[in-house]
Image (spheres, rainbow, N blue to C red):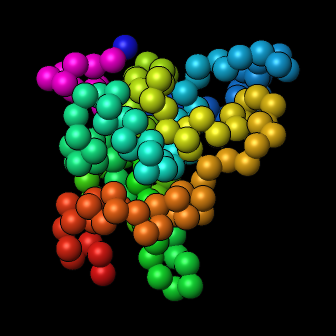
Amino acid sequence: MRPRQSESIDVAPRCFLGTTAHEMESERPPQGKSCLRCGICCKTHPCALAPDDLIKLARFLGTSSAEIFKRYLVLDYVFVSGEKRYYACPARASDQPGTIVASAWTFSDSPCVFLRDNICTVEQAKPRGGKSYSCALMTPKKSAAFGKMRAEKAWRGSQLLKELLCLVDPSALS
């Protein structure tokens, strides 16, 4: 399902609003079974990237890291000792890619741009944060998730982050 460079990935919003915890629980697969491909994780949980994930996505989609950022990613941040520390993650369908989002940002109102028909369109190059996420409907993974704090550490001091920060509106950095 690899899009050609000239094709764009469908980023139309998919809604699952109204799904209750009880409905989600009733959908739970038997223990040890595979993912339901319901897409709830990609509709509700921001997925953090490591710098090498961005390079992998660029190779998979046949374009540059800068182009991937401008078309599909945003910079999120956490505060460490009062300072903003940035990391990349997929934009939501309603976000403006290539920008910085608020730290309280979630997928609560719009899914990941790479989700189409509850399938990850970049599954073969899925970012570390998506691979490590423990599905709420399945038995949690034993390994710790690659979340905001781990992503921030992975991006800290990265030349790639410096290059991405040069692509955003300077007023967003204040």
Q: Is residue 174 above or below residue 146?
A: below
Which of the 4 image quadrants contains residue 161?
A: bottom left
Location of residue 42 in the rendering, given as x and y in whole percent from the top left corner: 52, 35
Relative side of 43 to 121, left or right: right
Horizontally, residue 121 falls left or right of residue 8, namely right
Q: Is residue 84 visible?
A: yes
Q: Is residue 117 above or below residue 164?
A: above
* Placement of 83 over or under 66, stated as above or below: below
Furthest residue toward bottom: 82
Q: Is 130 on the left or on the right of 98, as rendered? A: right
Q: Where is 70 relative to 156, above or below? A: above
Residue 3: in magenta span: yes
| Residue located at (31% from left, 36% from top) | 58
> Is-magenta flag for residue 8?
yes
Image point (60%, 63%), residue name: 149
Q: Which residues are magenta?
A: 2-13
Residue 26: percent from left, percent from top: 77, 22
The residue that appears at 22% across and 34% down in the rendered structure is: 63
Position in image of residue 130 (x %, y %): 56, 38
